[in-house]
Image (spheres, grey):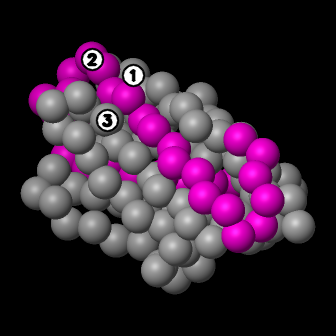
């Protein structure tokens, strides 16, 4: 089992920045990759970014060049630095971990971008 706790969501003006954090605990040795997804009201959950245990990184086209995913292995934490935020980035952001025992999700953190 892997437990994930997100933090950092907030209300921000368009053009602003936020950094989300996701702290992992439990069977962290079994994690192969971690990432972020988001879900806006009335829409399906959308994958945003991922980083593997080997350091490979991928982004959705909608956030490429604006968002940066990184990790602190010592703290078992993954970050999502979000710059040049747009109103369409408004969503609940979820952290996930792909581990040997399955895929685990956090409870989500709300990001609201006001125009």
- Could you say whether the residue bearing mark 2 is in a helix, strand or loop? strand
Residue at numbered disc 3: 77
- Please tell me which residue lies in front, 112 or 36: 112
Q: Which residues are magenta?
A: 10-39
- Could you say whether the residue bearing mark 3 is in a helix, strand or loop? strand
Apparent side of residue 78 relative to residue 43 in the rendered image (left or right) = left
Q: In x, y percent, where is residue 101?
A: 26, 31
- Please tell me which residue lies in front, 99 or 111: 111
Q: In x, y percent, where is residue 29?
A: 13, 29
Residue depicted at 40% across the width and 47% down the height: 79
- Residue 26: give its label: 2
Look at the image and tell me whether residue 42 can be seen.
Answer: yes
- Please tell me which residue lies in front, 56 or 83: 83
Determine contact: label 2, label 1, CB under 8 Å: yes
Apparent side of residue 74 relative to residue 77 in the rendered image (left or right) = left
Does residue 22 belong to the magenta stretch?
Answer: yes
Against 72, residue 49 (above or below) is: below
Marks 2/1: CA–CA distance: 6 Å
The tag earlier along the polypeptide, 2 or 1, is 1
Does residue 38 belong to the magenta stretch?
Answer: yes
Q: In which quadrant is the N terminus drawn?
A: top left
Residue at numbered disc 1: 3
Against 98, residue 87 (above or below) is: below
The tag earlier along the polypeptide, 1 or 3, is 1
């Amino acid at each position: 089992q892997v437990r994930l706790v997100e933090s950092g969501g907030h209300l921000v003006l368009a053009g602003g920045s936020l950094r989300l954090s996701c702290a992992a605990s439990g069977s962290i040795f079994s994690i192969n990759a971690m990432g972020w997804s988001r879900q806006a009201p009335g829409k399906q959950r959308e994958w945003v970014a991922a980083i593997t245990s080997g350091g490979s990184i991928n982004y959705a086209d909608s956030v490429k060049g604006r968002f940066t995913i990184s990790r602190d292995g010592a703290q078992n934490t993954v970050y999502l630095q979000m710059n040049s935020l747009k109103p369409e980035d408004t969503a609940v952001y979820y952290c996930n971990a792909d581990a040997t025992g399955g895929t685990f999700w956090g409870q989500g953190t709300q990001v609201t971008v006001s125009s």
